[in-house]
Image (cartoon, rainbow, N blue to C red):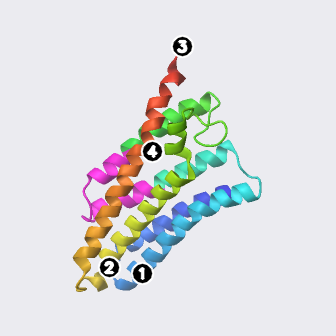
Amino acid sequence: MANLISILRIFVAFIAIGLLYIKTSQAYAWALTLTAVAFAMDGLDGWVARKFNEVSDLGSVVDIMGDRIVEAAYWVVFAALGWISVAFPLICITRAFVTDGLRSVALAKGFTAFGTNSMQKTAIGSFICSSKFMRIAYAVAKVVAFMLLVAAYNPGWQEWIYIEELRLTAMVFAAAAIVFCVIRGLPVVFESRRLFKG
């Protein structure tokens, strides 16, 4: 069930993103709602896995894969629509390839991205990559950035007097999300050296 939620989340996000190309206020309202649903599903899959004892290595991989697809898709489309710089998706995708490539080596050696058998062995690495605080802070920055960007470019809101302030706030959260993205990838890079010894 948890893996199914992770996979369905990707399709919910794709529908939301597709609605951004229908330039009506109603389509954007639906896109905003579905974006919130997609991110709520990200928390739901983990809760279901723990509640029903479905935690597994496969589940961890499917969850991370879903996260990468959803996040990259939003950044790419926002850049394609001209709302953000292309640097945002480039940074996000580069970080994903680097960290997930290293995590695949770790998985082959019996380590997981999170949990008791995590590849992160230092306290600071574990905090940055795995702590509830960092994971929630990163997720909040992303979901707020994505939802504010969708709201700020809603065709029906363009005459709103505070639209520029809304766009600026969206960009602040987008920048925070990218900073979190990079910072949370650094321990994976630095601690991966031991995987290649010998």
Query: Is the residue under label 1 in contact with that under label 4 (CB below 8 Å)?
Result: no
Quarter of the rendering containing residue 172: bottom left
Reading the image, the residue beneath label 4 is 184
Question: How far across and down, in percent of the image, does residue 42 sit?
Answer: 57, 60
Can you name the residue that lies furthest to the top here?
A: 198
Q: Is residue 123 left or right of residue 83?
A: right
Q: Earlier in the sequence, mark 3 or mark 1?
A: 1
Mark 3 and mark 2 in contact (Cβ < 8 Å)?
no
**Which one is in front, 98 or 168?**
168
Judge the density around disc 1: few (<14), some (14-19), many (≥20) Cα neighbours within 10 Å.
some
Amino acid type indicated by mark 4 = Arg
**14 relative to 59 in the view: left or right:** left
Give neighbour class at mark 3: few <14, some 14-19, many 20+ (Cα, 10 Å): few
How far apart are labels 1 and 2 at the CA level? 8 Å
- Name the residue carrying label 2: 154
Query: How far apart are labels 4 and 1 at the CA level?
Result: 31 Å
Amino acid under disc 3: Gly
Disc 3 from disc 4: Cα separation: 27 Å
Location of mark 3 (residue): 198
**Image spot of residue 145 (x, y percent):** 38, 65
Image spot of residue 194 (x, y percent) = 52, 22
Are the residues tagged 2 and 4 within 8 Å (C-beta)? no
**Residue wearing tag 1:** 29
Which sits in the foreground, 27 or 192?
192
Q: Which residue shows up at 31% across the image and 53% down it?
A: 88
- Is 59 situated above or below 80? above
